[in-house]
Image (cartoon, rainbow, N blue to C red):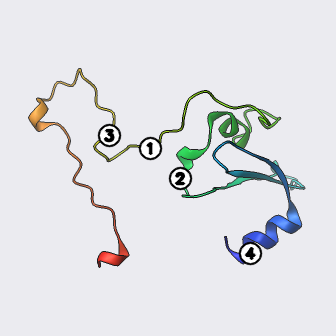
Amino acid sequence: MHLFTKIHIALFCNFIGKDQLGNRYFQEKKATRLRYPRRFVLYDKKIDASCIPQLWHSWMHYMVDQPPLGETFSHKHRPNATATDKAFEYDSSVMPSHLRYKSHYIPFNPDNS
């Protein structure tokens, strides 16, 4: 975490709660005249927006006013599988199976450059 983020949290934000994945949620102490107080998350491990449970997601996007403290969801988290071999594919696809999308995506790795 950057130094500026730590300072901003210490001075201007309230800790709201922590989810079962270890993500910590914060909200600014004051709102400006034109908007609600900002809400944000500090991820426990990898920064991945799909790691926010849906109950916390609804709080983050101002769908509910109260954070889901102590509430858990029964399903285990699965990471986003887009552009991987585990990506969902419809069985009713009209394209022949040998022509269907195969991921050729190779993520950038600075160590292999």
- Judged from the image, the secondary structure of the residue bearing numbered disc 3 is loop
In the image, what residue type sits under mark 3?
Answer: Lys
Label 4, label 3: how far apart the Cα atoms are: 38 Å
Label 1, label 3: how far apart the Cα atoms are: 9 Å
Question: Foreground residue, 106 or 73?
Answer: 73
Q: Which residue is mark 1?
A: 80
In the image, what residue type sits under mark 1?
Answer: Asn
In the image, what residue type sits under mark 2?
Answer: Asp
Disc number placed over residue 4 in the picture, else none:
4
Label 1, label 4: how far apart the Cα atoms are: 29 Å
- At horizontal 21% and vertical 53% (from top left) the residue drawn is 104
Q: Position of residue 85 (x, y in %)?
A: 28, 43
Tell me, yes or no, whether the two marked residues, 4 and 2, touch with CB atoms within 8 Å. Answer: no
61 sits to left or right of 47: right
- At horizontal 69% and vertical 39% (from top left) the residue drawn is 56
- Judged from the image, the secondary structure of the residue bearing numbered disc 1 is loop
Earlier-in-chain disc, 1 versus 3: 1
- At horizontal 67% and vertical 70% (from top left) the residue drawn is 1
Q: Which residue is mark 3?
A: 86
